Image (cartoon, rainbow, N blue to C red):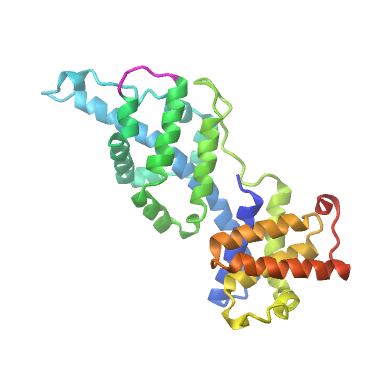
Amino acid sequence: MLNRRHIRVKVMQSIYAMHQNGSENLEKEEKFLLFSIENIQDLYLVMLSSLIEICKKEAVFLEKSAEKYLATPEERNPNKKFINNAIFKLLSENSSLSIALETRKINNWTLNDDYILLLQAAIKDSSLYKKYMTNRTNTFDEDKQFIISIFSDVIATNDKLYDYLEDYKLTWVDDIPMVNTQIIKQIGALKSASDDSFRVPKLYKDAEDKEFVSNLFRKTVLNEVELAKEYIDKTPNWDTERIAEIDTIILKMAICEFLKFPSIPIKVTINEYLEIAKEYSTPKSSIFINGILDNLVKEFQAANKIVKTGRGLM
């Protein structure tokens, strides 16, 4: 689920938090970093299970409406296309998802079902729902596209849901887009109503990525003074005290990768941190950082300070 850029962002944010808190407890901060990354899996499960819970709420609503003493003909014989959606059924019966929800003790919607009711109402009020419910026939392709559309256009964009997720776990804020993209990608890959290939994804691609988190964090933090010396005289036109703190952290992390991660290509490091700067720092930051890193690479290569092996040579 996690890619290297997201790992770099989480490390950057942890180093920034250390600076802001004045903390020097490396082990404590590393533990919190790993814990915040582990919690991404919970966010994934919370978002995905919202679909199942919305379907359950609508099924209960239809059942109660049909039992009313003065129920209308439409309430007695409702259009069940929504609750019969193949994706709802597939997710609710998926063992990988059920086991993960139980193992991680995900019960957010049991304790906060008002948000499910809110999402249910938003979906039913949408033009997507009205168009989908114009007939009573379920087809897999239409069912799948409908779920993708309501998830991306109604659920993922709901401000009250966003506020709830932010209040529940602040570290989730930057993880929400990645998690939502993962869910949409997985639903989009389903081939049929009997497709049993859906699996809750592993958090890390492999052991190397998991090690990369701690290695990047530790090697950057433990060498901050030395890493800063590499760029400090390369900013004559910039007041060092006015350089955004995020920019200094990005520079240190990038230089750390140049010098201490031989398997990571130079171009990959530069491109990754420029994209991170564009998203998390000032409008001019990427230009500033690109100029510094470009000059440093030339100097390091001339002095044979950069040694790349394997994939790092690419």
Q: Is residue 116 left or right of residue 37?
A: left
Instruction: Name the residue rendered at 62%, 62% in the picture.
Output: 11
Q: Nearer the viewer, residue 249 or 91?
A: 249
Dominant secondary structure of the residues highlighted in magenta in the image? loop
Q: Nearer the viewer, residue 102 or 81?
A: 81
Q: Is residue 169 above or below residue 47?
A: below
Q: Report the magenta residues as a range.
A: 134-139
Asked if residue 157 lies in the magenta stretch, the reply is no
Q: Is residue 60 above or below residue 243?
A: above
Residue 257 is drawn in which quadrant? Answer: bottom right
Instruction: Name the residue rendered at 73%, 81% in the picture.
Output: 233
Query: Can you see residue 32?
Result: no
Which percent across, then down, holds residue 262? 82, 58
Q: Is residue 211 left or right of residue 113?
A: right
Residue 15 is drawn in which quadrant? Answer: bottom right
Count of marks placed on residues: 0
Which percent across, then down, holds residue 209? 70, 51
Q: Nearer the viewer, residue 39 or 103?
A: 39
Which percent across, then down, holds residue 254? 70, 64
Q: Is residue 201 above or below residue 77?
A: below
Q: Is residue 258 left or right of residue 94?
A: right
Q: The N terminus lies in which quarter of the figure?
A: top right
Q: Is residue 63 left or right of residue 19?
A: left
Residue 218 is drawn in which quadrant? Answer: bottom right
Instruction: Name the residue rendered at 30%, 40% in the picture.
Output: 122
Query: Can you see residue 62?
Result: yes
Instruction: Name the residue rendered at 46%, 59% in the picture.
Output: 170
Which percent across, then down, holds residue 314? 81, 50
